[in-house]
Amino acid sequence: MSQLQEIELKFLCAPEDLVRVLAAAPAGDDESRELISVYFDTPDLDLQKAGASLRVRESKGQRVQTLKRGDGLAREEHETPISSDAPDPALGPLPDLLPARARGSLKPAFHVRVTRRQRLVRFDGAEIEMALDQGEVRGGKEVSPISELELELKSGDPAALFGLARELSHAAPIYLSFASKAQRGQALVAGCPLHAHRRARVALGKDATVAEVFQAIARSALESIAANAEVLRQRADAEAVHQLRVGARALRSALSTFREVVEDEAFERVKSELRWLAKACDDARNLDVFADETLLPAAKLDPAPPALPALVAEVQAAREHAAADVAQAAASARFRDLLIEVTGWVDTGPWLSRPPAGEPARPFAAKALQKRRRKLLKDGRDLAGLSDEDRHQVRIDAKKLRYAAEGFQGLYGRKGPGDFIKALKSMQDELGALNDLATAETLLNSLGLTPEAAFAAGELVGRKTTDKKRHIAKAAKALDRLADIAPFWG
């Protein structure tokens, strides 16, 4: 059996654009072949839960069993030729991944069939294998098309992968994707092939370095950004807009938390592009919140404001326009460049060679969390007496502390940080409601509502203003509870 670290980038690309990608690529000899892969798992999805995938691939009469696990630029890969259509549960790390009771229960989960056009090229001193796959993934009666470009490093500097990706992205729209064929098949079988994506919980070892923690946090955010942008390029989805913006903001927050480690010549550019992406979602998100939190409850009022239907119609038109703007941003060359540039910087940036990057993460985490907690408690004193602007700053403090606590959580186990994060979330919810109330008037003024709709909007916002004191009191109570919780970082 062969074991190696597979270093690979994957891109989504429309079938009609694959020819342009090939034309823009360095010259080389092409080989085409049909690949038929059957992915296996247990009825309890033990491999999926372990972050691993297992397939048997047939090509030209030969079968190869492959197990992959890990994330990021480099993934662990175990390959061995086999003679059977079924996998051998004794090979590689499978005995360690599968409970003894499950080793005889591996069953086909889904199939992937693609035509692969492959080319080995030289770029910036590196040897890179290009693979263009067209085909489908099939699980039961469900089918989903595949049209992808893969760039796999065979030798040389991993930075060359990103250099080639930048060149190819200027020739055709290619979108960096963090979802493997296995993950697409798993989603298809689960009945949710294309859906809004929440940031995954960051998995960390207690001995992780500062760089490893930052990379894990950043990759989780980038994966969410890429997945939600894919949804939005195909349809309007309020939750995907929300999660896309959360991903961009979470990564910007990580840049702030890790600034002393990761700041280099690319730092400000990365931060600026993430700010652009989050801002591109602002109008759509604010309108979605107003529609869900104000207009939907208003329909249940007795009596409802007489001009409510007019307001609903105008807000819906604005939502559709804002959603189209987000879709345009998610399909833009600027977005494609952002994903390639930021991912390349996270995985291969010069900041990795500086001493703080290789130091143990726990002392760094404790210092960063303590600093953010202290700022929140200081800024949050006397919430009721603060201006709306100052309460908004407290909300930002709480959000940054929560992002940091969730990112570092894996260093301390799941139990310790739970109550701390729960109290932070409660506080954020109340401060978020206050912020929505404070910005509602500005939002509505920007829409240029007709007099009839504007009157209805003013009535609804006026009614919600009566909830202000209640939200402030609940936020203050959550802050007091947070102050009483012993810091989980010791």
Image (tube, rainbow, N blue to C red):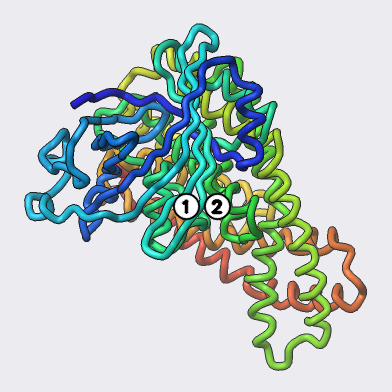
State if disc 2 and disc 1 touch (CB < 8 Å).
yes
Q: Which residue is mark 2?
A: 243
Picture quadrant of residue 165: top right
Q: Where the C terminus falls, by quadrant?
A: top left
* Residue 241 falls left or right of residue 439: left
Please state which of residues 375 and 222 is positioned toward the viewer in this rendering: 222
Question: Hey, which residue is sitting farthest bottom in the picture?
Answer: 302
Q: Total label count?
A: 2
Question: Hey, which residue is sitting farthest left in the picture?
Answer: 100
- Which of pointers 1 and 2 lies earlier in the amino acid sequence? 1
Percent across and percent down for residue 88 are: 14, 42
Q: Is residue 16 above or below residue 447?
A: above
Percent across and percent down for residue 167 are: 64, 21
Near mark 2 (Cα within 10 A), the count class, few <14, some 14-19 or many ≥20, is many
* Residue 63 falls left or right of residue 374: left
Q: Which residue is mark 1?
A: 198
- In three-dimensional space, the C-alpha distance between marks 1 and 2, rounded to whole angstroms, equals 6 Å
Please state which of residues 158 and 211 is positioned toward the viewer in this rendering: 158
* Residue 323 falls left or right of residue 249: right
Question: Hey, which residue is sitting farthest top in the picture?
Answer: 125
- Checking the image for residue 378, the label placed there is none
Near mark 1 (Cα within 10 A), the count class, few <14, some 14-19 or many ≥20, is many
Inspect the image, locate mark 1, and give the three-letter code of the amino acid beneath it.
Arg
Determine the residue positioned at 81% across, 78% down: 456
Please state which of residues 202 and 42 is positioned toward the viewer in this rendering: 42
* Residue 445 falls left or right of residue 301: right
Q: Is residue 170 above or below residue 277?
A: above
Query: Does the rendering let one see residue 490?
Result: no
Circle 1: element type: loop
